[in-house]
Image (cartoon, rainbow, N blue to C red):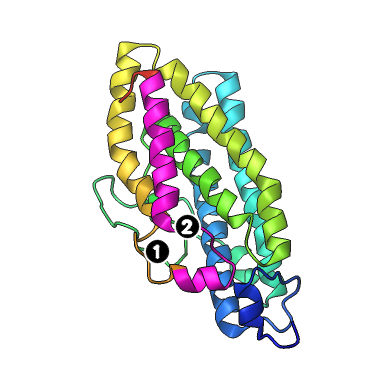
């Protein structure tokens, strides 16, 4: 590494293990990634907290409560790494409107709103139990694919956290699929689920980011991304198409 710059080292698959000597642009991109994840998890947790009482039974209520708890825990784990980089984590100790949502009919694409870095999908409101299950299934599948990417980032302590939480996020998606299977067992449930899929699918898809992103090559050189947005989106589309076909919802 003596003849390389740190950026060359990263471009050739090198790993970093501490905040010391991290290039400024690398730090900025890493902080952006972490802030988006933390804010999205907190917004997701707050959103699902509001539908726990809509759950049709004790098991469903426990599942929803587990998702609320574990998403907040995941946010805290990544926030600890942000603190090591000098991030102002005090703002997370105060009151922030994580449960705030836009009108149901809003369409903001992939833009950020409300003074935080949550993915745009977490700005839209849930409407009852079926809607929350559908959103959890679609976004849960997206989260697992994205975490597979994040689990290979070049900042090793963060990659380890992402790999540790991926099984729990996968379990959240699995709980959602179990619930959606029960909903799709009736004609009324299938009709409601199809309406929710039509609403949430484009909004979840927007979370994969711009196709042909100009930032991707820089992130790849830093070892913060491996596969482009369109490849991750294609994986997700394939999974969702297959799942909806299995449940008679396509």
Q: In this image, 105 relative to 207: left or right?
A: left
Which element is circle 2 on? Answer: loop
Q: Nearer the viewer, residue 127 or 155?
A: 155
Give the alpha-carbon distance from disc 1 to disc 2, as whole Å. 9 Å
Q: Quadrant of the N terminus?
A: bottom right
Residue 169 vs 106, above or below: the answer is above
**Residue 131 visible in rendering:** no
Residue at the outermost front position? 3
At x 66%, y 82%, the residue is 6
Q: Earlier in the sequence, mark 1 or mark 2?
A: 2
At x 25%, y 51%, the residue is 106
Task: Kindly identify which residue carries mark 2.
Answer: 97
Boundaries of the magenta span: 217-246
Residue at the outermost top position? 186
Q: Position of residue 123 (x, y in %)?
A: 38, 52
Q: Is residue 139 magenta?
A: no
Q: Is residue 219 magenta?
A: yes
Q: Quadrant of the C terminus?
A: top left
**Residue 142 visible in rendering:** yes
Q: In this image, 230 relative to 56: left or right?
A: left
Q: Position of residue 78 (x, y in %)?
A: 66, 60
Task: Decide whether the magenta segment is chiefly helix, strand or loop.
Answer: helix
């Amino acid at each position: 590494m003596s003849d390389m710059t740190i950026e060359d080292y990263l471009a050739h698959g090198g790993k970093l293990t501490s905040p010391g000597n991290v290039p400024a642009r690398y730090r900025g991109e890493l902080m952006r990634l972490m802030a988006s994840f933390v804010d999205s998890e907190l917004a997701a947790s707050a959103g699902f907290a509001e539908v726990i009482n809509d759950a049709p039974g004790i098991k469903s209520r426990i599942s929803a409560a587990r998702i609320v708890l574990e998403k907040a825990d995941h946010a805290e784990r990544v926030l600890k790494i942000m603190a090591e980089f000098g991030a102002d984590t005090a703002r997370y100790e105060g009151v922030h409107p994580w449960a705030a949502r836009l009108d149901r009919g809003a369409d903001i694409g992939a833009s950020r709103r409300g003074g935080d870095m949550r993915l745009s999908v977490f700005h839209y409101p849930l409407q009852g139990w079926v809607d929350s299950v559908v959103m959890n299934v679609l976004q849960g599948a997206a989260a697992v694919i994205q975490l597979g990417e994040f689990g290979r980032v070049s900042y090793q302590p963060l990659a380890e956290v992402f790999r540790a939480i991926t099984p729990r996020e996968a379990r959240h998606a699995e709980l959602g699929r179990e619930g959606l299977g029960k909903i799709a067992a009736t004609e009324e449930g299938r009709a409601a689920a199809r309406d929710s899929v039509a609403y949430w699918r484009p909004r979840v898809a927007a979370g994969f980011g711009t196709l042909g992103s100009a930032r991707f090559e820089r992130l790849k050189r830093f070892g913060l991304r491996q596969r482009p947005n369109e490849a991750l989106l294609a994986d997700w589309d394939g999974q969702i198409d297959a799942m909806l076909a299995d449940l008679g919802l396509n």
